[in-house]
Amino acid sequence: MKPAAFDYVAPTSLDAALTALADGGYDAKPIAGGQSLVPLMAFRLAVFGQLVDLGRIEELQGVARDGDELVIGAATRQAAIAKDALVAEHAPVLAQATGWIGHQQIRNRGTIGGSICHADPAAEYPATAVALDATIDVASTRGRRSIPAAELFEAAYTTTLEPDEVAVAVRIPVRRPGEGTAIFEVARRPGDFALAGCVVRVATSGGAVIDARVLAFGVGGAPIRLAAAEAALAAGAGVGSQELTAALQADADGLTPPEDAQATSAYRHSIVVHVANTAIAEAIADSQ
Amino acid sequence: MSAQTGGAARFVGASVKRREDPRLLTGGGQFVDDVQLPGMLHAAFVRSPLASARIASIDTQAALAVPGVVAIFTGADDFPRLPPWWPSEANVPAQHPLAIEDVRFVGDPVAIVIAESRYIAEDACELVDVAYEARTPIVDYRAAGEEGAPVVHAELGTNLVAEMASPPDPALEAAFAGSDHVFKETIKSHRYAAVPMETRGFVASWNKAGGELTVHMAGQAPHVARAYFALSLGLPEHAVRVIQRDVGGGFGQKAFQARDDMAVLHAAMRIDRPLKWIEDRQENLTAATHSRHEQITIEVGVNNDGLLQAIRLDHVLDAGAYPAMPAEADPGLVAAWFPGPYKVPHFGFRNVQYYTNTTARGPYRGPWLIETTVRETMLDIVARGIGMDPAEVRRRNSIQAADQPYQLHSGIVFDRVSPAETLEQAVEMAHYAQFREEQAAARAEGRLLGIGIASYIEPTAFGGGRSMGIEAATIRIEPSGKVTCLMGLGSYGHSVETTMAQVVADELGVAFEDVTIVQGDTASAPVGGGNLGSRSAVIGGAVAGMSARKARAKILDLAGHLMEAAPDDLELVDGVVSVKGSPASSMALTEITQVAYNGADRLPEGMEPGIEETTRWSAPFVTHSNATHVCMCEVDRNTGLVKLLDYVVSEDCGVMINPMVVEGQISGGVVQGIGGALLEHIPYDADGNPLAVNFKDYLLPVADLIPEIRIGHIVTPSDTPGGHKGAGEGGTIGGVAATVNAVADALAPLGVTITEQPLSPSRLLALIEQASA
Ligand SMILES: Cc1cc2nc3c(=O)[nH]c(=O)nc-3n(C[C@H](O)[C@H](O)[C@H](O)COP(=O)(O)OP(=O)(O)OC[C@H]3O[C@@H](n4cnc5c(N)ncnc54)[C@H](O)[C@@H]3O)c2cc1C
């Protein structure tokens, strides 16, 4: 369980990092917290000749407010997000999501950019980013662009980033009045990746839901919108109503969840409705 | 105990803090991977990716060309075959350190690469080109005896390892025929592993000129390992030194030497430099041993009054490709001890064991514990079947004090055990009646609460005149007056440096701080059986105490001579010898040792200088401890997840040397039982690939899942010198069954019967859904 030999650079400027990645081509790889990449390399499931450490680049660190958005540097540690005052105020569900990620030791190292770019199908941040309509700013020596989170995640462990691109920041619209959010998941042990999870954001007016985002994770390749449930909620279906239950069941039946040593596919399919219901109820309560 | 031998008992019975802890908790431990020798090389294995295949060719050229690679050995290098570990009458194949023509499980060692670093060795492993011709493996042990099943070891012509059965018994048949009810179930135990925190590891250095092999290792029994190494390597025993300083757990997995272990030592003897091999976690989960993969079909005859009439077992075991234990061990223990704490008038069994193309079966804390799992889960099924409370069924069948000595069908005798007493204490500590009320209220709300009981009587500290049953201790009162006790144990973290010092301090009459336990090195310790089979306290404690008493007698003889008093009138307390009743007339131990070592002219006629005493003792056949566990849980209807609410153990391990250590052993054991019941599992796919070979897929229990484990004690001293009974394995033995029973009880209102583990949320939710469909 030792990785193959690799070169390592830790530039202090984004430009230097981008150049190193451009020069390295497919053999180069950014490393942030290393909590996903290092195990892959130790198992030799991934081999890269050149690691470019993003940890010393000032520009990628920290949380700031920019107008109607929170801007979170891609290399900001998960542990820092969990206790950040701006996040608590303007995107509280991101802090809640952080609590479900692994263990404290992992959150001390792991970063938001790493989590999003790694795109583990059971990870909390990708689904949360989509539920919050976040945008990911990316850069390469070829220039900069912004990708809506909903367009970033293609499949399990696959994003629309090019190999020479680095995520620079995650932009999250600040919470609006009347909005409610929640995240809930089921795992076999505290800290394990979710067997099924759900992030919900509802917009309400006069106490009634007028719009909803319901994102399931752990049950497919990328974060999955439960569209029938979203529609039912927007049409006024309440928690526990037949309409919402039927919609969730229809969404669940459209999934083909993975099967592994931790749980069967049938199990993941079975619990989605319960997990989503729990998160929806909490999000609505949060909006009041 | 100490009252009879002088010196008030001060340490035995006290929860003295572990003296190992400051060292271990501050990073001062000396584990095998901490050993760095000049010029040391590193080994890594090329292992089979296939469950069954013929090796057509191995090309090592590219791997040998990697800078830093020193040597590569394969089956062609003729490392001699392993001698049998124990005599056995089973069908046993030749075991070679490295696969010769065939690979027989995923993880089978095919080549060992020696390089300047582990990194380079792993680089080279990837370049060793092995051409395999794949064959159809036999993966399911239940099908391994069928006509036409692929045969794991062609030389044997069969997958049958061994078969045993009790003789036909018309009285047994009659007892079943006469029972009011007969219940029958097949209860399956799944494959999981010991998973010591420290994996296997060696640093071996061969001194060619001196003809000496030094082996630092993560093991359990240094002298037993030394004897086996000498035999395997063709060296005289004294030419092998085994050093085992700190070890991060063994649980049985390190109690014997496997093929890859021996490949490391053979390789070390063919190169001129020290060689280190540290097994990585993936190897440990793939190629060290697996355990507990077996099933028992049980029939129970019982009357309306709950009294058991007859039990019959049909036990089938998966041995894997190269089982570590002799075939007779586990099934023999199951058959001989099965009725456990209950009076069962008629009993019969059959067991059969098969080779499969999977990782070897090996011992794991309570290797025979399926007897408790099956007996106790079946008792609950019986209780539900006849409509009687599970506690009451146990109460009615329990062996009572008045029944003892109680002889089992197998000839085993239970004496000085207290199953009826631990049952009552555990039930009371669990507030059993109150829980039943809460359960009824919760059920009315649709919640699934459950309570499960498991009792067992556990054979510990096997004696019977063989190496495991014999132990020695040498007590040396140093010239400084401090005490060194040399022992053949091999601590793997279970506190013997503390507990043995407690015994010695009391028996001698010196301070605990003045006693040092030296163990784990064949160069200094007397030959001993090591640490396995819950033997350390019973056998180790006994010999340490005996040698201490001998040393004390000599001290008092010499003091009597010097003080002109009768030795019988003297006592040794806190390192000072004084005349009983007149403390003014006294001598410090250091004054006496000065004479013993430096004043031969002042010794009494005929007394040897120095104070050093050795005792070697052969323990009685077996010592029985017993316990009752009660587990309480809630099962979430929506997710199938189990939340443990409370856990109680009432145990009887006789005289406790250190209650904190006993409770630590029990708690750790219970957690491993819970882990087995709920989480830990190494499934195989149909092609023979293990599916949980890292800690992402192999789920160990974590602290968040475990409630406080509350422990009560009943103390029935054994008839061994210290009155101790083994406490190492029981926690695990009861832990599986109590957890399974709690979950089964929670689901009982749904009409669900649980006969298979682990109780994963997938399994439980499927049961819940079926029941409500
Ligand atoms: C025991 C354990 C449990 C865990 N449990 C969870 C869990 O429950 N939920 C969960 O979500 N995660 C979990 N994780 C994963 C953890 O959250 C990781 O930290 C995260 O997935 C990756 O972040 P990182 O900063 O460590 O990235 P790295 O491991 O350094 O990198 C991961 C990938 O992202 C790429 N990358 C990193 N940063 C950037 C960037 N700025 N731009 C472009 N590409 C980039 C890397 O090249 C690599 O491909 C767990 C990890 C462990 C070890």
Image: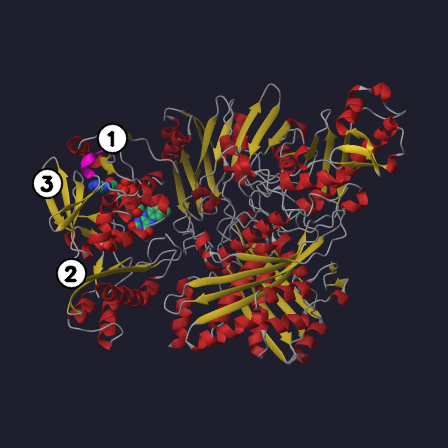
- Judging depth in this view, the residue of B711 and B30 nearest the camera is B711
Q: Chain of mark 1?
A: A
Residue carrying label 1: A10
Indicate yes or no whether the magenta region holds residue B439. Answer: no
Rendered position, B65 above or below B465: above
Rendered position, B38 above or below B685: above
Q: How is the image coloured?
A: secondary structure
> Of the residues under marks 1 and 2, which one precedes in the sequence?
1
Residue carrying label 2: A177
Rendered position, B592 above or below B766: above
Residue carrying label 3: A144
**Can residue B532 be seen by looking at this rendering?**
yes
Amino acid at circle 2: Pro
- Judging depth in this view, the residue of B405 and A236 nearest the camera is A236
Amino acid at circle 3: Arg
Ligand 1 resides in the quarter of the picture at top left
Quadrant in which the C terminus of chain B appears: bottom left
**Can residue B547 be seen by looking at this rendering?**
no
The stretch of residues the image draws in magenta is A56-60
Instruction: Determine whether, in the image, residue A77 is placed left or right of residue B684.
Output: left
The CB of the residue at mark 3 lies under 8 Å from ligand 1? no
> Of the residues under marks 3 and 1, which one precedes in the sequence?
1
Q: Splitting the image into 4 quarters, where does residue B339 fall?
A: bottom right
Amino acid at circle 1: Ala
